[in-house]
Image (cartoon, rainbow, N blue to C red):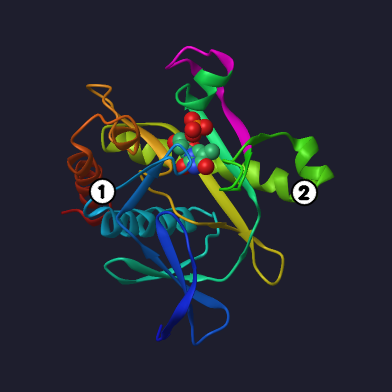
């Protein structure tokens, strides 16, 4: 599709959104910048931008093929993809298969506790507030999403979990947890938006149990770039066969 990139619309912690000559499409640009603990820790992961762009593109295409509509249109450059313009619903959906991260701290749950069935939590998308945990009551009272929208987001997130757990398992990785964002198009359809990358999920090597995601950066575990590369190479082999 020939769409021309125009000026920046907004810049986030890891991505920049650009307008285009078509009102219904925007360009999503992936930076190497990395943050942890809601922006308290800042740095760069060299090569992350192109890796996250590729991984998101593979994952979105795979999910589309399996019945999950997304905002993805096509990869247009090493760090850029064309996406449909959506109105982001300010509720982040987190799905957990194993306990890690904030749920362990918040509730004293033992790390690696297996959630059967997978556990869903909602967070408010707000950098200023540090993405606080919210309940359905908050969501409906403040009209961040309707009950129908939330139900659809939750069921889509659980379907994404089923599909991607399998994919990651096939490349020797455990999908521990992940965060999704959704948006609505002009017709009110709910599309999976934002990204799916090692920045927004936990991936542990199936054999060693080692984290290969942004936790390496958050907790100064070393071999950060190498771990992003490792996940990229495994998924490249899986999706492109080389
Ligand atoms: P948490 O353990 O910090 O709540 O995060 C759960 C998963 O969701 C983890 O893979 C990181 C991801 N996540 C984000 O990427 N951004 C967010 O704002 C939140 C709340 C979670």
Residue 204 colored in magenta in the image: no
Residue 108 colored in magenta in the image: yes
Assess mark 1: CB under 8 A from ligand 1? no
Residue drawn at x 60%, y 48% is 126
Is residue 69 shown left or right of residue 195?
right
Which part of the image, by quadrant, shows the C terminus?
Answer: bottom left
Label 1 residue SS:
loop
Q: Is residue 88 above or below residue 101?
A: below
Is residue 241 shown left or right of residue 193?
left
Residue 68: image quadrant is bottom right
Residue tagged by mark 2? 148
Estimate the x, y position of residue 193 in percent, counting from the top left. Answer: 53, 58
Q: Nearer the viewer, mark 2 or mark 1?
A: 1
Residue drawn at x 43%, y 65% is 16
Q: Which portion, as a residue range, is magenta?
A: 107-122
Estimate the x, y position of residue 148 in percent, counting from the top left. Answer: 77, 49
Residue 135: image quadrant is top right
Residue 216: image quadrant is top left
Estimate the x, y position of residue 105 in percent, counting from the top left. Answer: 51, 19
């Amino acid at each position: 599709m020939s769409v021309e990139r125009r000026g920046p619309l907004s810049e986030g912690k890891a991505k920049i959104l650009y307008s285009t000559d078509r009102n219904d499409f925007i360009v999503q640009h992936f930076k190497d910048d990395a943050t942890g603990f809601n922006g308290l820790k800042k740095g760069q992961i060299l090569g992350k931008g192109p890796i996250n762009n590729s991984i998101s593109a593979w994952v979105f295409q795979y999910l589309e093929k399996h019945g999950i509509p997304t905002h993805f249109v096509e990869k247009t450059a090493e760090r850029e993809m064309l996406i449909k313009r959506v109105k982001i619903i300010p509720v982040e959906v987190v799905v957990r298969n194993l306990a890690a991260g904030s749920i362990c701290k918040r509730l004293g749950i033992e790390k690696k506790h297996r959630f059967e069935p997978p556990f869903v939590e909602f967070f408010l998308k707000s950098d200023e507030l540090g993405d606080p945990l919210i309940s359905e009551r908050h969501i409906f009272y403040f009209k961040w999403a309707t009950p129908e929208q939330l139900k659809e987001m939750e069921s889509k997130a659980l379907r994404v979990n089923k599909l991607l757990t399998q994919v990651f398992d096939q490349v020797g990785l455990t999908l521990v947890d992940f965060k999704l964002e959704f948006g609505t198009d002009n017709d009110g359809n709910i599309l999976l938006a934002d990204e799916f990358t090692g920045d927004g999920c936990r991936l542990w090597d199936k054999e060693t149990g080692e984290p290969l995601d942004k936790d390496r950066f958050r907790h100064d575990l070393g071999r950060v770039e190498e771990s992003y590369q490792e996940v990229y190479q495994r998924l490249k082999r899986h999706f492109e066969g080389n």
